[in-house]
Image (cartoon, rainbow, N blue to C red):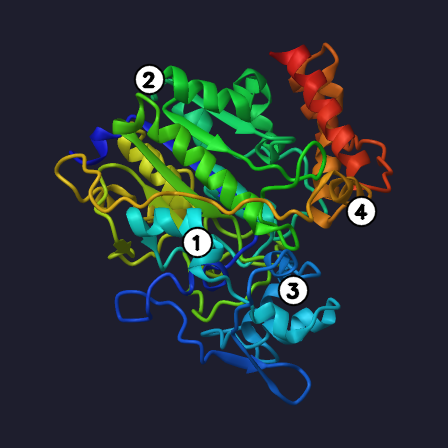
Amino acid sequence: MAALSRIDHFVVLMLENRSFDNLLGWLYPKSEHFDGLTGNERIPDGQNGLVQVWHASGDAQDMRLPTPDPGELFTDMNQQLFGSAPVTGVPPMNGFAVNYVSHGGKPRDIMHSFTPDQMPALVALARSYAVCDRWHAAAPCQTWPNRFFLHTGTANGYENNSPTHFPYLMDTIFNRLADKAPAGWKIYFHDFPQSLTLTKLWDFVDRFKPIDDFLSDCSNGTLPSYAFIEPRFFANTDWPNDMHPPHNVIYGDRLVAKIYEALRASACWPSTLLVILFDEHGGCFDHVPPPSAVPPEPPRDGQVFAFDRFGVRVPAVVVSPWIRAGTVFRSTGLQPFDHTAISKTLRKRFAIDDPLSAREAGAPDLEAVLNLDAISDEGRLNVVPLSPPPEDDAAALARARLAPPNDLQQVLLEAAGYLAPLTQPGSIINHVEAIVRGWRPAQILVQSVEQAAAEVERVMTALKQTRS
């Protein structure tokens, strides 16, 4: 474990709903060493024609493609991967356009991809350090299941965000690190941390910190052993930076640059590993078929999906001064990289024996990516994100706040309802037992993103005051 022992601080930023081809397909020319786009990839458009991959000039509307938001339910993803073929065997990856049309989109828009100059921060880091062209979402499922895989090694059998299944009682890598990681762990968030839906983290609200604390911890050289960063999901005080379609990807790219620059300036930098990930592909086209997967656990009676298939490829960029510039990596073992590689790496570094799941037990770790014998600045590119478009002024943000909340924002609002009783003095155990017995929060009715954001932030503020 010589290489991995050099790392004392692991930082993971997980963004939203973009495929590898969508953001990094043009990073390098396609070759046996980098499985990107050729420009000739095409699929049926559902209208007796074909639609081909393309890229646009990059005006404000282009940077929000695909618009509207594609389908991302388990059933949507099956259609995207398999088209009209049986959901078995190797996916032909030919149903993205047909599925997108069923959600009101133009078939061509789902095949859009961004060029390197449109994603300058993410691309500069991918070229300056390492990129994985075979990192798959843990499952062909929505945001919550894939984020659960990152934190717990499993989705506990739930393939969609909704209906919710509180309480989520899975063991987490954070709990495993409790007495093993010398500097502990923290979760940094912008408006609402999806990770707080995990019941076993409810005793640790004091370790959930606003994003400005991450910048302070970098500046002060006081980063935890493991830092997980969640983006801004709601348009409120600023634009969302999660990259969830149709949010403008510029803001997510600016967040990437902000996190990186804070780490580069930190005394912790020589012993830091930063991983930039996306939870799932969000319906965006990718040409590489996901392989079969080891189920995290035996399926329960009535479970819809056995979690025996990976999801679509997602961008994965790994950054450390111990990585040679221009590194492209894949797993050399039986199992490709997926989100369980993060907990596998953490367990290996901090000598934690018991895997979180059967999937995580067989996952590769990131030690081999640390391929330098000494820290080097050779080949590091400047990381300069694009400026926000002038159209995104205060009036435009005000209009965005008045838009109806998307599916992810709605389910985060529901999660806030489950957390609300914890803002009052009382036993966490009693609240969990009440949920198990059937307690449900009253539905919170909102008309706009602004109202939803205000409610989740109200709950988080009260929760911090009560439980920290």
x, y percent for residue 144: 60, 45
- Give the mark, 2 or 4, whose residue is nearer the N terminus: 2
Which residue occupies the foreground of this view, 83 or 258?
A: 258
Q: Compared to 193, does 74 lie above or below?
A: below
Instruction: Look at mark 4 in the image and give the residue it sits on.
Output: 403
Dot 3, how many residues are within 10 Å of its Cα: few (below 14), some (14-19), or many (20+)? Answer: some
Q: Secondary structure at mark 1?
A: loop
**Rendered residue at 57%/37% (across/down):** 231
- In front of the other: label 1 or label 2? 1
x, y percent for residue 310: 46, 59
Q: Which mark is residue 182?
A: 2
Instruction: Look at mark 1 in the image and give the residue it sits on.
Output: 315
**Cα separation between marks 3 and 1:** 23 Å
- Give the mark, 4 or 3, whose residue is nearer the N terminus: 3
- In front of the other: label 1 or label 4? 4
Which residue occupies the foreground of this view, 387 or 229?
A: 387
- In front of the other: label 3 or label 1? 1
Q: Secondary structure at mark 4?
A: loop
Dot 2, how many residues are within 10 Å of its Cα: few (below 14), some (14-19), or many (20+)? Answer: some
